[in-house]
């Protein structure tokens, strides 16, 4: 028995050493290109004549990548608008901020975002939405896409489990149709086909149409996640609520939904991460989110050959947000497991 354990231990060590060796062989050339042989600082394009990465392209084009073609003298506005949305999102992730103040923040932060970005009031110079771009647009599409889709998804999940056939059929049809169509198709329909169906006087800009498309698409996926959570709640919970005279609305909001949502934390956050990454698709319909502004930065012939560095920079931004949401998911799961252990 001891011999078998020692043999298994040595085998595990050999596998670990082999994996580390392979990673070192694969990652060291990347480290050498990105760090050891790279050109750093704010230098002209002709200074990047080596074999390493040319990070001066980021120093030169960072403003265009992050803020798009927003007026340079007004960059504090998209920075503040993005901070408001991110601050509201972070507050939502922390239970100690839950309350009426957070509800007010969700009401006012979208209004302030559009006031700051668009201007035209309170002495702010007007900036057309065609000049908006970069990280603020990615944040806007993600935060609004998640914030508005989540309650819609909960309603759709409850409707799909409804005892009323018409409500159940409508919710089921909506969810299955939307989930059966790629997001890019819905974006194309919202951008090019919807204006043909609306009256000519209805001038809805492409960014709002894309935002609504993301919300409706995300709501269908979140509905299935929430429905899976609702089905894990024992039927005895519903029967107990009826026996105590608790209304169906109170039973769902106070008893059933809290239990259901805590059981599907991981797939819910995974859907949130997918929404963030899917915002890059709006570049196909000519909306200047983060990926589109990166392409605009690479239109400069002096820096065009350094596209790898630009896309690495974009990937790092996406990774930071996705990693933060992943850590938040683990924190929520650990808190839920700890609370269950104390019961």
Image: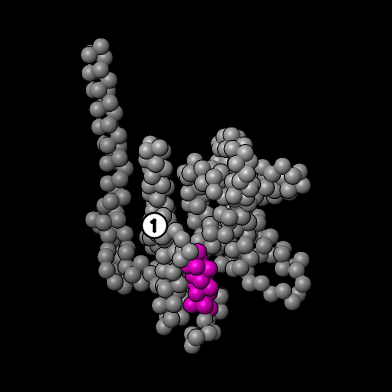
Q: Nearer the viewer, residue 292 or 201?
A: 201
The secondary structure making up most of the magenta span is helix
**Is 116 contained in the magenta span?**
yes
View extreme (bottom): residue: 123
The vertical placement of 48 against 32, above or below, is: below
- What residue do we see at 51% from left, 42% from top? 259
View extreme (front): residue: 244
- What residue do we see at 72% from left, 74% from top? 202
Within-10-Å neighbours for mark 1: few <14, some 14–19, many 20+: few
**Is 104 contained in the magenta span?**
yes
Colouring rule applied to residues: one colour
Instruction: List x then y, in percent, for residue 111.
Output: 53, 73
Instruction: List x then y, in percent, for residue 341.
Output: 38, 36
Instruction: List x then y, in percent, for residue 80.
Output: 42, 73
**Screen quadrant of the N terminus:** top left
Residue pointed to by mark 1: 96
Instruction: List x then y, in percent, for residue 98.
Output: 44, 58
Q: Nearer the viewer, residue 17 or 342?
A: 342
Q: Secondary structure at mark 1?
A: helix
Q: Is residue 343 left or right of residue 142?
A: left
**Screen quadrant of the C terminus:** top left
Q: Is residue 272 visible?
A: yes
Q: Nearer the viewer, residue 287 or 5?
A: 5
Look at the image and give the residue range highlighted in magenta.
Answer: 103-118
- What residue do we see at 50% from left, 68% from top? 104
Q: Nearer the viewer, residue 89 or 323?
A: 89
The image quadrant that residue 333 belongs to is top left
Q: Is residue 209 left or right of residue 110?
A: right
Label count reads 1
Q: Is residue 280 visible?
A: no
């Amino acid at each position: 028995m001891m011999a078998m354990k020692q043999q298994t231990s040595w085998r595990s060590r050999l596998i670990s050493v082999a994996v580390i060796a392979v990673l070192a062989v694969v990652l060291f050339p990347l480290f050498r290109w990105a760090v050891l042989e790279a050109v750093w600082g704010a230098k002209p394009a002709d200074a990047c004549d080596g074999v390493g990465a040319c990070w001066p392209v980021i120093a030169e084009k960072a403003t265009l990548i992050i803020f798009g073609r927003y007026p340079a003298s007004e960059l504090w506005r998209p920075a503040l608008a993005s901070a408001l949305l991110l601050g509201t999102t972070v507050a939502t992730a922390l239970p100690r901020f839950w309350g009426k103040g957070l509800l007010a923040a969700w009401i006012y932060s979208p209004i302030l975002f559009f006031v700051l970005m668009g201007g035209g009031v309170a002495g702010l110079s007007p900036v057309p939405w065609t000049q908006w771009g970069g990280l603020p647009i990615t944040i806007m599409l993600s935060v609004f896409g998640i914030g508005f889709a989540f309650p819609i998804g909960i309603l759709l999940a409850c409707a799909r489990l409804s005892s009323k056939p018409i409500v159940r059929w409508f919710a089921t049809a909506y969810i299955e149709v939307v989930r059966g169509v790629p997001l890019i198709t819905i974006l194309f329909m919202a951008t090019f086909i919807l204006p043909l169906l609306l009256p000519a006087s209805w001038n809805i800009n492409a960014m709002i149409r894309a935002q609504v498309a993301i919300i409706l698409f995300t709501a269908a996926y979140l509905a299935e996640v929430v429905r899976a959570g609702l089905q894990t709640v024992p039927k005895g919970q519903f029967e107990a609520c009826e026996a105590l005279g608790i209304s169906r609305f109170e039973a769902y909001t106070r008893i059933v939904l809290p239990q259901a949502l805590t059981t599907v934390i991981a797939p819910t956050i995974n859907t949130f991460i997918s929404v963030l990454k899917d915002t890059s698709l709006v570049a196909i319909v000519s909306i200047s989110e983060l990926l589109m502004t990166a392409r605009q930065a690479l239109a400069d012939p002096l820096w065009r050959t350094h596209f790898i560095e630009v896309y690495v920079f974009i990937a790092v931004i996406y990774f930071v947000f996705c990693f933060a949401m992943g850590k938040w998911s683990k924190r929520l799961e650990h808190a839920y497991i700890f609370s269950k252990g104390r019961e």
